[in-house]
Image: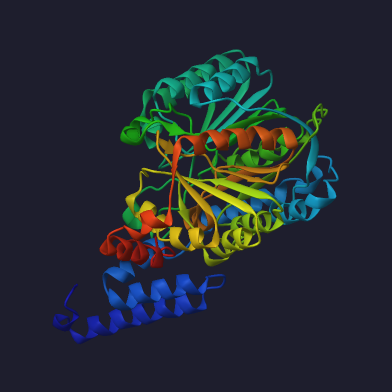
């Protein structure tokens, strides 16, 4: 730690003023949970120099005044979210859950949707390429990570083919997650073919970004909308399962659902809002096209969350789903660093006799998150939650099934990064067919997993348990 005693008095006074100002900011900032306040106070007081730097870089959740003002201006121009699809009256049991979801973006539950559930990364890209090749009006894609591997380049080629035949193609990626694609020849090739491209949350000079907004806020969404009729929801990035940038954890195992029907218009709304914010092109006309006629019986509702949206929207919705369960809950997520409310909801479900199963990857690409996740195992197991660790690869699917008719699927992990820092998108579905298909896939994950036991936890080396608990304490900071 830096020796502050050797600094001149004026420097010490300036440092003290900055530290006190940041401590006041921590105490006065609205919507910050007590654990987060305490964690940041510990960092600022225990690390008087490094703590200030860390807080300036990571302590706030602002994307910057320019982006925030632009996003709010865009949303003000768009039609009311609740008016873009006809509202379907959900089953009485789920009405309050769809109302909860409606409070986040304004979308209502829409019926008449159909689904397909591709099995694996290649099958998902097969379906996506086929849909792009069949597109007649427009193709809209947003990915957090888009790699220049086999599957990534298959989609690039499909975009080039679609643009060449006159289809309007808009392609957006996150500045950090897809930086290799942005710097590659393929990004330029899509533009040359006629596709429009945009980069979300450009970083620029990280050293100067502290004066603009938090450097690590990311657009983690995966949105596909084709001809306002087809959309995808799930966890897969535009990449091979081998996931070349982190190949030692491969295969990356995802879950993506293909939906056709009115729900595509709600994902379109999320895409248009992001596109107009970052690309600056007005494409509101996409939201004025006739809504496709519903041909199925699936009730669906899109949910977009992020740091410029309502605070704590994602965990509130997830907790509402957990408390709605009557017989069973199954959760799959690669990253699990819950807040107190989510942990309590999981344990409460098990205590009231619900069969609660949680599936995590046995090997995680983030050792810190993996260690923090395992610090919660004891409490969950004591409550009766069954925990499984998936062995064949990195389980990256983010799914939640409730009883036999409710499913939440999308990009949100059960961690504070997804809850507070990332832009995410999910779809809430009421359908026995969808839920049965997702539960069958979840069952396959469990079959390829080992069950974590209390005996296994008891045998864990005491210093390792202490390390896990210490990391969990810093969860609000991490």
- The image quadrant that residue 437 belongs to is top right
Image quadrant where residue 318 sits:
bottom right
Percent across and percent down for residue 131 are 62, 20
Residue 93 horizontal/vertical position (percent): 80, 51
169 displayed left or right of 88:
left
Quick one: 447 or 269, which is closer to the camera? Answer: 447
Q: Quadrant of the N terminus?
A: bottom left
Relative to 204, say whether 65 is above or below. Answer: below
Q: Nearer the viewer, residue 170 or 448?
A: 448
User: What is the residue that sits farthest to the front in this orientation?
Assistant: 455
Residue 62 visible in this rendered orientation of the protein:
no
Q: Against 449, is 328 above or below?
A: below
Position of 361 with respect to 228 (left or right) is: left
Q: Is residue 150 above or below residue 389?
A: above
Position of the C terminus, as image quadrant, is bottom left
| Residue 371 percent location from the top left of the image | 36, 55
Residue drawn at the location 27% of the way across and 68% of the way down: 50
How many numbered badges does the structure rendering display? 0
- Is residue 148 visible to the viewer in this orientation of the structure? yes
**Identity of the residue drawn at 43% across and 26% down:** 240
187 relative to 431 in the view: left or right: left
Between 441 and 365, the one nearer to me in the picture: 441
Is 73 positioned to the left or the right of 63 in the image?
right
Q: Residue at x 21, y 86 (%)?
A: 9
- Tell me residue 56's x, y (percent): 37, 66
């Amino acid at each position: 730690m830096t020796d502050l005693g050797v600094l001149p008095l004026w420097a010490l006074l300036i440092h003290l003023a900055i530290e006190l100002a940041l401590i006041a900011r921590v105490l006065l900032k609205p919507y910050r949970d007590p654990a987060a306040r305490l964690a940041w106070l510990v960092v600022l007081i225990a690390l008087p120099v490094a703590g200030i730097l860390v807080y300036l870089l990571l302590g706030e959740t602002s994307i910057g005044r320019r982006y925030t003002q632009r996003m709010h201006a865009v949303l003000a121009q768009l039609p009311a979210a609740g008016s873009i699809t006809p509202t379907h009256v959900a089953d009485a049991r789920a009405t309050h859950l769809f109302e909860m979801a409606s409070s986040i973006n304004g979308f209502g539950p829409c019926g008449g949707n159909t689904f397909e559930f591709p099995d694996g990364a290649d099958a998902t890209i097969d379906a996506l390429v086929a849909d792009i090749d069949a597109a007649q009006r427009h193709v809209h894609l947003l990915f957090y990570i888009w790699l220049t591997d086999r599957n990534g380049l298959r989609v690039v080629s499909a975009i080039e083919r679609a643009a060449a035949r006159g289809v309007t193609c808009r392609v957006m990626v996150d500045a950090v997650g897809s930086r290799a694609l942005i710097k590659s020849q393929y990004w330029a090739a899509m533009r040359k073919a006629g596709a429009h491209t945009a980069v979300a949350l450009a970083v620029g000079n990280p050293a100067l970004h502290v004066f603009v907004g938090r450097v690590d806020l990311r657009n983690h969404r995966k949105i596909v909308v084709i001809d306002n009729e087809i959309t995808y929801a799930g966890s897969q990035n535009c990449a091979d399962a081998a996931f070349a940038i982190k190949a030692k954890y491969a295969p990356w195992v995802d879950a993506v659902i293909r939906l056709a029907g009115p729900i595509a218009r709600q994902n379109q709304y999320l895409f248009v809002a992001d596109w107009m914010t970052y690309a600056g092109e007005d494409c509101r006309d996409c939201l004025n096209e006739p809504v496709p006629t519903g041909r199925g019986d699936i009730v669906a509702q899109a949910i977009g969350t992020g740091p410029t949206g309502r605070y704590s929207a994602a965990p509130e919705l997830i907790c509402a789903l957990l408390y709605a369960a009557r017989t069973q809950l199954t959760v799959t997520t690669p990253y699990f660093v819950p807040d107190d409310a989510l942990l309590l909801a999981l344990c409460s479900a098990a205590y009231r006799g619900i069969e609660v199963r949680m599936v995590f990857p046995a090997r995680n690409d983030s050792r810190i998150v993996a260690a923090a996740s395992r610090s919660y195992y004891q409490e969950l197991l004591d409550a009766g939650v069954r925990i499984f660790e998936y062995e064949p690869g990195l389980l990256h699917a983010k799914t939640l099934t409730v009883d036999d008719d409710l499913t939440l699927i999308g990009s949100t992990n059960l961690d504070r990064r997804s809850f507070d820092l990332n832009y995410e998108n999910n779809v809430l579905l009421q359908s026995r067919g969808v839920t049965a298909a997702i539960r069958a896939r979840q069952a396959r994950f469990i079959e390829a997993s080992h069950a974590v036991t209390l005996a296994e936890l008891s045998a864990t080396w005491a210093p390792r348990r202490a390390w896990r608990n210490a990391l969990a304490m810093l969860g609000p900071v991490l």
